[in-house]
Image: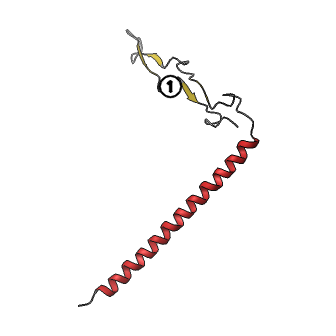
């Protein structure tokens, strides 16, 4: 009863195919990351600074105006207004520039 021959062939073939797929996946991921890194470096070298954030990548939160809390009440006609953590900046008082997405250049 020697059934290990065909089973071993199937397992070996599957291992070779899956290994090849994994190697191609790794190679393509590294290649795409390298290409995007190089193109981003070139763009950064020649790009003008962002006019919205003046090249910083962040600006003061527009919702809480840098206060980190907002006055909020769940009711239409509020009886009491509670200070709540700002949902836009999450209490950090600054938000990422939406024009340059935090890169600092256009």
Quarter placement of the N terminus: bottom left
Q: Is residue 67 left or right of residue 76?
A: right
Q: Quadrant of residue 85?
A: top left
88 left or right of 97 in image: left
Against 104, residue 45 (above or below) is below
At horizontal 61% and vertical 35% (from top left) the residue drawn is 102
Determine whether, in the image, residue 66 is placed left or right of residue 83. right
Q: Residue at x 37, y 78 (%)?
A: 11
Find residue 22 and report its horizontal and vertical position in percent.
Answer: 48, 66
The residue beneath circle 1 is 92
Q: Residue furthest top?
A: 79
Q: Is residue 36 above or below residue 5?
A: above
Q: Residue at x 71, y 29 (%)?
A: 51
Q: Quadrant of the C terminus?
A: top right
Residue in view at x 33 percent, y 87 percent:
5
The image position of residue 42, as x and y in percent, is: 72, 47
Residue 47 is situated, as x and y percent measured from the top left of the image, at 74, 40
With respect to residue 99, does 77 lie above or below?
above
Binning the other alpha carbons within 10 Å of mark 1 as few (below 14), some (14 to 19) or many (20 upward) gives: some
Residue at the left extreme? 1
SS for callout 1: loop
Q: Quadrant of residue 13?
A: bottom left
Total numbered circles: 1
72 up-or-down from 46: above or below? above
Residue 40: x and y, percent?
Answer: 67, 47
* Colouring scheme applied when the structure was drawn: secondary structure
């Amino acid at each position: 009863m020697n059934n290990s021959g065909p089973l071993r062939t199937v397992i070996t073939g599957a291992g070779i195919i899956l290994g090849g797929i994994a190697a191609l996946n790794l190679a393509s991921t590294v290649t795409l990351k390298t290409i995007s890194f190089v193109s981003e470096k070139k763009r950064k070298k020649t790009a003008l600074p962002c006019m919205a954030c003046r090249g910083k990548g962040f600006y003061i939160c527009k919702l809480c105006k840098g206060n980190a809390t907002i006055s909020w009440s769940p009711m239409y006609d509020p009886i009491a207004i509670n200070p709540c953590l700002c949902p836009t900046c999450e209490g950090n008082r600054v938000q990422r520039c939406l024009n340059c997405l935090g890169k600092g250049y256009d």
